[in-house]
Image (spheres, rainbow, N blue to C red):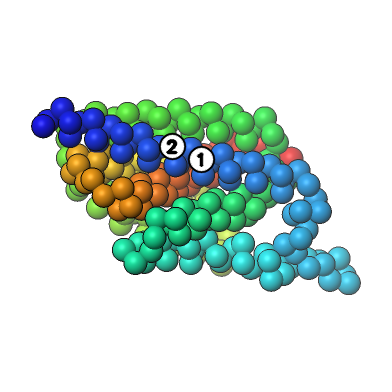
Amino acid sequence: MHNSTGVLSNTFVANVFLWMFAALGITALTAYLFGTTPDLMMSMFSVRADGSASLNLLGWIVMLAPLIIVFVMSYGMEKMKASTMIILYIVYSILMGMSLGFIFLAYTGASITKTFVITAGMFGLMAFLGYTTKTDLTKMGSILLMGLFGIILASVVNMFMHSESLDYIVSIIGVIIFTGLTAYDVQKIKQIGMLGLDNNETMTKISIQAALSLYLDFINLFLYLLRFFGKRN
């Protein structure tokens, strides 16, 4: 029984990572296409007569829709079909790619690649630790989530203060938080897999939700590290 539970857990974790890698691939490809194709990037902006630009309807959809999708997927999972979850997940990864296209305008391709490799290394190490550790990370997860709300609040405040020092501090704390959350989320995913649920529909939906958590850990870790390792164009 223990062996079969272990196999189910390993299979579930593998499926979650496959979904996460699929979304990262879609996001990376979309970001590259938009970041290197001016016409695609400008499709999200309206240019005024004086040459200034602002977000148009598509731009606002790209900015706001991901938040709505995360909310819908989190709180409407029980009522949704697995196929609907998959569609929302793919749409989410495309929208994120469209919004992340700006990094190819702001940073050099070499520094983006270097930061991605560093992120992948850190993420992989913490995922391994989260999967293999015998220590219960629940308490650490609760502290990290409180820290996450703290840096979100600090980031909002800094939108008005424009403090480079605060931005630097938030970036350091952001790296620490999402590094820790990676280990916490992987351990939680392993524990879910050990439950041995045999309903394919339910497991697919849980897999998508878990993959979204890891995806967000990776993307946020990458963006915070990019502030340190990214070389401006």
Residue shown at 11% from the left, 32% from the top: 1
Name the one closer to the observer, 32 or 79.
79
Name the residue type under label 1. Ala
Name the one closer to the observer, 188 or 198.
198
Q: Within 10 angstroms of label 2, few (less than 14), some, or many (20 or more) residues?
A: some
Residue shown at 51% from the left, 44% from the top: 23
Farthest residue, direction right: 49
Residue shown at 68% from the left, 42% from the top: 32
Image coordinates of residue 105 in percent, x first then y, are 72, 46
Is there any visible trace of residue 226 in the rendered image?
Answer: no
Name the one closer to the observer, 186 or 107.
186
Q: Marks 1 and 2: in contact by CB < 8 Å?
A: yes
Residue shown at 48% from the left, 47% from the top: 220
Q: Which residue is mark 1?
A: 22
Image coordinates of residue 97 in percent, x first then y, are 61, 49
Q: Within 10 angstroms of label 1, few (less than 14), some, or many (20 or more) residues?
A: some
Image coordinates of residue 89 in percent, x first then y, are 48, 53
Q: Which residue is mark 2?
A: 18
Give the quadrant of the C terminus. top right
Name the residue type under label 2. Leu
Task: Judge whether 188 appears above or below 73 on screen.
Answer: above
Task: Specify the label residue 120 is tagged with.
Answer: none
Label 1's element?
helix
